[in-house]
Image (cartoon, rainbow, N blue to C red):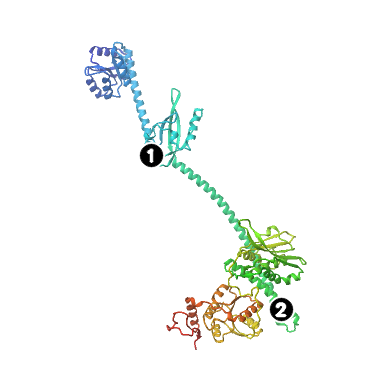
Amino acid sequence: MENKPINVLLIEDSPGDARLIQEILAEVQEARFNVQRADRLSEGLVRLGEGGIDVVLLDLSLPDCHGLDTFVKVHANAPMVPVVVLSGLDDEVLAFTAVREGAQDYLVKGQVEGNILHRAIRYAIERKATEEELRRSEERYRSLIESAVDAIFTMKLDGTITSLNPAFEAITGWSCSEWLGRSLWDILHPDDAPAAKDLFEAFFRGEPLQPYEGRVQSRSGEFIVLEIRATPQMEHGEVVGFFGIGRDVTERKQAQERLQELYEREKELRQELAERTAQVEDAYLKLYQLDQMKDSFLSTVSHELRTPLTSIKGFAEILLSYDDEDKETQREFLTIINEESERLTRLINDLLDLSRIESGRMQWQTSKLSLQEVIDTAVNAIHALSAQKQLDVSVDVQPDLPPFWGDKDRLVQVVTNLLGNATKFTPAGGKIGVRAELVKEGEPPNLREVIRVSVSDTGIGISAENRESIFEKFRQIGDTLTDKPRGTGLGLSICKEIVQHYGGRIWVESEVGSGSTFYFTLPVADVVEQRGSGVQGEGEEEIEQELGKVILVVDDEPNIRKFLKHELASRGHEVIEALGGTEAVQLARKHHPDLITLDVDMPDINGFDVTALLKSDPGTKDIPILIISVVDDKERGYNLGANDYVTKPIDGKDLMEKVATLLTRRGESKTAPVNDDRTLVRTIATQLKSKGFSARVTGGEDETSNGQPPSADSGTEPNAA
């Protein structure tokens, strides 16, 4: 300021006062002044408009303007130029008012000295510069506030909001005017406001203000998460309010929550992976154990097959090689062959039963049963072995047991298996007990009556680790051929499947060295009687053997035909043999036998189709058909009209009983409703025609293959050729 002259505009209409001011400024040594004078306001405003003025010395009483309005016009035209008001003694109040309106200072004419005037001019310029800098700073601050993306607000000590920036509107959708004057505690979510209050109260207890996250409801109804940071506003050392910034962290919060969810999910997945890994390892271990059991099973089956086959083959060769064996020796050898054949039969039956159970093809023949009869049959089955070991076998069946509907052969199989195991594992002279009684099982409201059958023994017992596993497939106690009995390890697993089929359960109670007791239950329930298996039922009269009947034996295996012919001829029957289905139809039409035994699996026409054809033919429909086959599909056979069904291998005694029954009841032969299935009949007729037959379909409006109406004769005849 000392080096550069100060441009002063003196607006004063009094020449004397103007000259005095100019002389005073000229005497100031610390600064140089360049004074320009205007005696009217209008002239002064023109000069101000030209620029370059550092300060204005203004008289408020001018010819063309008077009073405060003089200052207002000067300030309006040059707001950036500092103004020092010159007043007389009688205008001091007016001059002070001008200072309040923006003038930098005022001086009383007649009291002005050089240093005072210099200081007033200098301070005016400096204050104006400071004010301008402050104005620019405030402008920048306001610009920052208004352009900020964060919500910025001020509030009183009681939480009342006093100012808000535009970002608040952008974030919440509410206008600033809608929130001014409201309390911050009302804006926050009701669950978040108490914690916010606690933070501000903690500040007044001397603790620093901490950032806080609170939810604010937007105009759309959604809640926005704001991270609020507040600082106190101070005046004269006192807190008068707070300045706050609210940053929208909704997305960040959602991302954090999502990240936390992902972290928790990752933990769950890791846990699940660990569990799955454990399951895989457990499954691998079980597969390994199963593989071990399979190897053991194959070894056992191989042993069980080779041992009886060796005996059968060896003794058969002896009988074939030597003619001088005495009758007693021959009978002994044949007995061994028969026993080993039965052993092979049991093995094959177990394997077939396992296959049927696992494939869901097990055939269940339901009839009304007596548990006494089932148990007696099973006890008789193991009588020879129990007598050989001198075992005391006792039976205790509750006399008033209700009858049970089930498959007799399967239930006998269960009891026989349990008795067989008890016999094997009980030392000579021991005891075996069979008991059947009616008991209640379960807890209310699931209480039910069941028939409980138990088989107990005084044998070696079973360890705790083996009590459950013995019901698994291929599982036997012992690991070598020398320390376990003969068998495949399938018996108990098959028993379990049979019992569970009827809604029962099977278990064992045992201690090593104290014997074992096997239990199984059968629910007492009404079951509709289904087609029986043809076995003589309870209360039926004994069937007398009828002799001299004609029986057609149909099987493509010559040894089977030879066996059946021997058994039937030995009982006085005439046997006609057929090697396949085509020949069977011819012979049945020709001879009208009293009974047909029929194989299923034959090379030309299978036994099921032959059955359907014969039962739909009026000339053969009354001939009883006994299916004898390795194919265990009794339900299909019965539905097609078969009168009875036997699965191979054949039990000769049982077979002859069935033959006798069917011969006696010839008049009760069944006729299958094959004519109702036109597609099946046409299919069979086509097959027969391909074998050289002329087939006609009757019982409807269908024509024969040559397009002619059906004749009265509905059978099938072979061509003359």
Query: Residue 493 appears at what percent x and percent y?
Result: 64, 64
Residue 3 placement, left or right of 205: left
Farthest-out residue, top:
110
Decide: is 404 above or below 550.
Answer: above
Per the image, the residue denoted by label 2 is: 334
Decide: is 379 above or below 706.
Answer: above
- Closer to the camera: disc 1 or disc 2? 1
The image quadrant that residue 430 belongs to is bottom right
Per the image, the residue denoted by label 1 is: 173
Is mark 1 in CB contact (under 8 Å) with mark 2? no
* Quadrant for the N terminus in the image: top left
Residue 482 seen anywhere in this rendered image of the structure: no
For disc 1, the neighbor class at 10 Å (few under 14, some 14 to 19, many from 20) is some
Label ID, residue 657: none
Specify the amino acid type for callout 1.
Answer: Gly
Residue visible at 65% across and 59% down?
441
The image quadrant that residue 64 belongs to is top left
Which SS class for mark 2?
helix
For disc 2, the neighbor class at 10 Å (few under 14, some 14 to 19, many from 20) is some
Distance in Å between CA atoms under marks 1 and 2: 104 Å
Which SS class for mark 1?
loop
Query: Residue 499 appears at what percent x and percent y?
Result: 63, 64
Decide: is 116 above or below 457.
Answer: above
Residue 560 placement, left or right of 35: right
Query: Residue 716 appears at what percent x and percent y?
Result: 50, 84
Pointer 1 or 2: first along the chain: 1
Residue visible at 71% across and 81% down?
319
